Amino acid sequence: MKLTLVKNILDTRINRGAAMLEVSDIHVYYGLFEAVKGISVNIREKELVAIMGPNGHGKSTLIRAISGLVKIRGGKIEYNGKKIDKLKPPDIVKMGIIQVPEGGHLFPEMTVEENLLLGAYVPGAWKKRKENMQIVLDLFPILKDKMDQICLTLSGGERRAVAVGRGLMSSAKLLMLDEPSLGLSPLLAKELIKGIKKIKDTGISIILVEENIRYIRELADRIYLIEQGKVTLEGKKDQVLGNKHVKKAYLGII
Ligand code: ADP
Ligand code: MG
């Protein structure tokens, strides 16, 4: 009886408070170079956490470490309480942790539909491919008339939409977007941001690496600032964007 009670209390706590992803004090090296120097971040269900910081300071490396694409040396990564930092990338994908890499990495000679369907080659996601495809097309209606077009001939914005859409085709529970708006015209970027906002509204947790403060302001619940391989500031959006150092270095306000 007592045990059940304790278990119930614990379950409630897990559901309410605990992070779905907990990255604790991880270090990543490329050869002798330490790119990530003891970073801790976490994200809860339905949250959108933005990662900002200068180029070359370890943001993509952090995302790649979560995906299992680079090994961590020290620290740990837990997903829903389970340690995942020794797992192989496909096993991490199967858990619903999906990365959309910088630039998207589509297959240029394959059509939009084929590229999207590639995302569905994940256990569980294949049976939901029709439903997920509908979600993708609702989010990015621009793709509706382009399903048979090869990706090579798409505009930059359309390509980015396919890359994010492919992530959704995998039935993502945690979507990690690495600079999705990079290089897009303001108009196309705005469309993409609208799509990301809608994804967030469906309840999918999102880690967004983004350099455009305007988009961060629009989308983020919390922000981590990463500088020189470390988290130098973290907090609720308003706290971080209101910080003196951030205002001076990233918003150009003195
Ligand atoms: P960001 O995403 O913040 O721009 P990255 O995580 O891509 O930064 O890179 C962090 C640092 O690690 C940079 O100095 C970069 O040159 C270095 N780096 C990234 N990838 C590799 C790699 N495959 N081999 C060696 N060094 C790398
Ligand atoms: Mg990067």
Image (cartoon, helix red, strand yellow):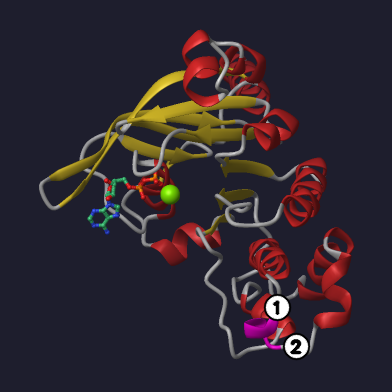
> Which three-letter amino acid code belongs to the residue tagged 1?
Leu
Which residues lie in the magenta part?
150-154
- Secondary structure under the numbered disc 1 in the rendered image: loop
Q: Which residue is mark 1?
A: 154
Q: Nearer the viewer, residue 251 or 242?
A: 251
Is 27 situated above or below 18? Answer: below
Q: Is residue 218 visible?
A: yes
* Amino acid carrying mark 2 in the image: Gln
In the image, taking residue 112 as reference, residue 32 lies left or right, namely: left
Quadrant position of the N terminus in the picture: top right
Q: Main secondary structure of the magenta part?
A: helix
Q: Is residue 97 left or right of residue 48?
A: left
Q: CA distance from mark 2 to mark 1?
A: 8 Å
Q: Pointer 2 and pointer 1: residues touching (CB < 8 Å)?
A: yes
- The secondary structure type at the circle numbered 2 is loop
The residue identified by callout 2 is 149
